[in-house]
Image: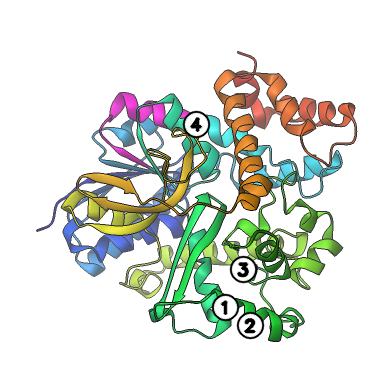
């Protein structure tokens, strides 16, 4: 029987994401009749998203209702679920920050945008705690690891982080020529820093198939000139990490550039180095690959915008009535209707799901979701070399970022930059910090760290 819930989407101006969520609701009969509240600071994009959603619901007979607002508190009133997909300042501000970092000697930027994101995340979580305290906050925007850890430590809001990176095991299966229907995999760690602890094909350990591919086919695969910019999962860098630590890095882990000071930073020293490890395009995060990503995203936005204004084209032609790879709506359905199922989630490490880390640290693992909530599935012990060489350094880096925001301590921002191996002089880090905090677009962050 359908059960209507209220879902607020913060940062709903991303038409492709928001319409995709609406499509997933339309193909979940148990959630028909739900209300979706779109919230964004861009009224023009809000109008477009709302128009798309209404047409899609009508086409698929889902009985959904919608509202749109630039007022976050209004969107949160009576919400059962809140999806935060907002990127503060959008890609324009992120790219401006990247250029700013490069002017000060930080190739591909110093990733300072995460601080503005995390401050915003915390404000949203506190609003939920005050306005709709029983709601689940589903954190979709990055940084999921640091952001969710911050929110769970600072508020009582129920926080769930979700990402797509765990689907990287499918790319491994594809390259190996395996039938995905017979492939299973388990991954754990931190978001964007997860490792495949189990990989099976037809019930048998499939890691030997990876080893055989490395011996017999890897070099020919890496020599291909037509590999896509996002083809990182079986890159030379990913295989190098596997051989170094004994487990395959999954999804975004091989391209983890938010922490160039960690293992993996040497894959990203400059474009030539990226091309050595990720192929001709230099991987997802190179100046070539990232521009292709931005271009593709712009094309998708234009496609969605054309759909919104073309009344002769069904919206369902662009968003066909089938469940996407997003876990958001299936998880909502499991929580609402007590449909027990297994998902890949980012939740607090209660009960030491991933051994060796505190319970108030958010980890990524498999989780059983039902009407009773979300219960993490205990993960196998990670190898000692992986713990010492990758996991503990990544944890310590996260603690620096989280505690910088928690304490409002400007000196911790400086420590963040001084920890970066690209920092050659104290004055280099101080100059970037000063320019960043003086930028008018950074006003909220500057105020936060002046308290």
Query: Depth-wise, is mark 1 or mark 4 nearer the camera?
Result: 1
- Location of the C terminus (image quadrant): top right
Alpha-carbon span between mark 1 and mark 2: 6 Å
The dot on residue 233 is 3
Provide the major secondary structure of the magenta segment: helix
Q: Position of residue 433 (x, y in %)?
A: 77, 28
| Secondary structure of the residue carrying numbered label 1 | helix
Q: Which residues, given as a range, are shown in magenta?
A: 122-137
Task: Read off the residue under disc 2.
Answer: 212
First of labels 1, 4 by sequence position: 4
Task: Read off the residue under disc 4.
Answer: 150
Alpha-carbon span between mark 2 and mark 3: 16 Å
Q: Is residue 118 above or below residue 3?
A: above
* Residue sitting at x 59%, y 20%: 448
Alpha-carbon span between mark 4 and mark 2: 42 Å
Q: How would you rate the neighbour count of disc 4 (Cα within 10 Å): few for under 14, some for 14-19, many for 20 or more?
A: many
First of labels 1, 3 by sequence position: 1
Q: Is residue 52 visible?
A: yes
Alpha-carbon span between mark 1 and mark 4: 39 Å
* Residue sitting at x 90%, y 31%: 425
């Amino acid at each position: 029987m359908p059960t209507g819930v209220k879902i607020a989407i913060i940062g709903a101006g991303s038409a492709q994401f928001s319409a995709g969520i609406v499509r997933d609701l339309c193909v979940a009969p148990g959630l028909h009749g739900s209300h979706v509240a779109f919230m964004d600071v861009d009224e023009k994009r809000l109008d477009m998203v709302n128009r798309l959603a209404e047409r899609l619901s009508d086409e698929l007979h889902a009985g959904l209702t919608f509202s749109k607002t630039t007022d976050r508190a209004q969107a949160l009133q009576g919400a059962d679920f809140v999806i935060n997909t907002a990127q503060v300042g959008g890609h324009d501000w992120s790219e401006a920050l990247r250029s700013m970092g490069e002017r000060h000697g930080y190739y591909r930027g110093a990733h300072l945008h995460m601080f503005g994101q995390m401050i915003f995340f915390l404000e949203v979580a506190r609003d939920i705690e005050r306005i709709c305290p029983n709601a689940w906050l589903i954190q979709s925007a990055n940084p999921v690891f640091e952001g969710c850890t911050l929110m769970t430590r600072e508020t009582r809001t129920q926080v769930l982080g979700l990402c797509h990176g765990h689907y990287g095991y499918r790319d491994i299966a594809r390259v190996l020529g395996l039938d995905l229907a017979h492939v299973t995999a388990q991954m754990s760690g931190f978001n964007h820093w997860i490792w495949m602890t189990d990989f099976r094909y037809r019930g048998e350990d499939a890691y030997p198939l990876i080893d055989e591919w490395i011996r017999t086919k890897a070099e020919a695969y890496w020599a291909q000139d037509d590999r896509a910019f996002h083809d990182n999962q079986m890159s030379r860098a990913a295989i190098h990490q596997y051989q170094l630590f004994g487990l395959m890095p999954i999804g975004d882990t091989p391209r983890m550039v938010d922490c160039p000071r960690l293992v993996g930073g040497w894959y990203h020293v400059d474009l030539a180095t990226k091309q050595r490890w990720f192929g001709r395009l230099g991987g997802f995060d190179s100046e070539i690959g990232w521009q292709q990503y931005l271009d593709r995203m712009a094309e998708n936005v234009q496609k969605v915008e054309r759909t919104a204004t073309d009344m002769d084209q069904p919206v369902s032609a662009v968003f066909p009535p089938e469940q996407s790879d997003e876990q958001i709506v299936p998880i909502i359905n499991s929580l609402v209707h007590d449909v027990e199922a297994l998902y890949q989630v980012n939740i607090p490490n209660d009960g030491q799901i991933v051994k060796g880390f505190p319970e108030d640290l958010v980890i990524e693992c498999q989780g059983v979701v039902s009407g009773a909530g979300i219960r993490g599935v205990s993960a196998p012990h990670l190898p000692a070399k992986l713990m010492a060489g990758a996991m503990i350094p990544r944890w310590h880096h996260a603690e620096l970022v989280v505690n910088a925001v928690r304490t409002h301590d400007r000196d911790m921002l400086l420590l963040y930059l001084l920890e970066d191996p690209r920092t050659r002089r104290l004055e280099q880090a101080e100059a970037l910090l000063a320019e960043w905090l003086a930028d008018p677009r950074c006003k909220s962050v500057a105020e936060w760290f002046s308290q």
